[in-house]
Image (cartoon, rainbow, N blue to C red):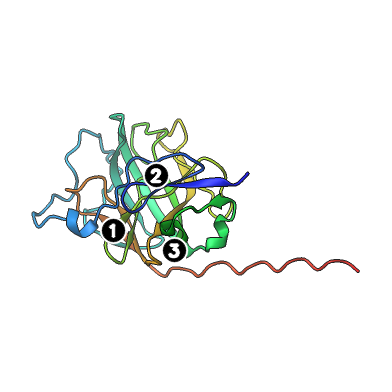
Amino acid sequence: MRRTLVALGVVAAVALGGCSRGSGDGTSDATASSSVSTPPTPSSTVEVPSAAHLTDQGSRLSFGDAAEVIFESTDNKGTVLRLTVRSVRMGRLRDFSGFILDDTYKQKASYYYARVTVKNVGHGDVGGAEVPLWGVDKTHTLLPAVNFTTEFRPCPSHKLPRRFLPGASLTTCLVYLAPDKGALEAVSYRPSQQYDPITWTGTVRPPLPLKKPAKKGR
């Protein structure tokens, strides 16, 4: 049975396998930014370990760099995460052949796969949360990662495990859909509109070469 690709929200809140992600609303990064200066770290009650070195808001990083940030999940749990965007690769429409693409937004998007690592370097447990990273396209629109309920082999994507205790780490792959054949310009950590985002940029790798069909024996 083919699985339906369900799109929610105005631009880019996308779910695969019939499961939604409520945080995406096609928010414009440029619109959300404020001219008011922001502190280097967000106001928070999360305890920051003495060994942690929080990355300043507004930092511009390269793929492979790590950022340490305060992260508070929606259930009032918080910790310090070390986020590393390792690489970004383009995907293809044919990668989604097992899903029903029932509107032009999904059919005419550009597809990107970001390989990321998350490590809990704080004291809290934020298990079950989505990896808090957005894609940013050339129009400065924030693109939420696609939420899968079934395996997507080209880019195996997982949220944080049910328990994500201090010292735990996860390497996963995030899928972003840029509308109208758009280009992914960056990956961003932005927990609120008041936060000057931390962004990662670098060379986006081309799609993997297509596998040649095996030759039939004579």
Q: Which of marks 3 and 1 precedes in the sequence?
A: 3
SS of the residue at dot 1? loop
Q: Amino acid at mark 1?
A: Thr
Crowd rating for badge 1 (residues with CA inside 10 Å; few <14, some 14–19, many 20+):
many
Which quadrant holds residue 23?
top left
**Mark 1 to mark 2: distance in Å?**
18 Å
Residue under label 3, please give it.
Answer: 108
Left or right relative to 216: residue 156: left
Question: In the image shown, does 110 or 41 lie closer to the viewer?
Answer: 110
Of the 4 image quadrants, the one containing the N terminus is: top right
Left or right relative to 48: residue 4: right
Of the 4 image quadrants, the one containing the C terminus is: bottom right
Spot occupied by residue 122 in the image (x, y as percentages of width and height) = 33, 37
User: Residue at the left extreme?
Assistant: 36
Question: In the image shown, does 69 or 3 lie closer to the viewer?
Answer: 3
**Mark 2 to mark 3: distance in Å?**
25 Å
Q: Amino acid at mark 3?
A: Lys
Spot occupied by residue 131 in the image (x, y as percentages of width and height) = 39, 44
Left or right relative to 46: residue 103: right
Crowd rating for badge 2 (residues with CA inside 10 Å; few <14, some 14–19, many 20+):
many
Mark in the foreground, 1 or 2: 1
Residue found 51% across the figure and 62% down from its top: 91
Crowd rating for badge 3 (residues with CA inside 10 Å; few <14, some 14–19, many 20+):
some
Spot occupied by residue 134 in the image (x, y as percentages of width and height) = 34, 52
Residue under label 1, please give it.
Answer: 141
Mark in the foreground, 2 or 3: 3
Question: In the image shown, does 217 or 67 lie closer to the viewer?
Answer: 217
**Mark 1 to mark 3: distance in Å?**
16 Å
SS of the residue at dot 2? loop
Q: Amino acid at mark 2?
A: Val
Residue found 46% across the figure and 42% down from its top: 169
Residue under label 2, please give it.
Answer: 131
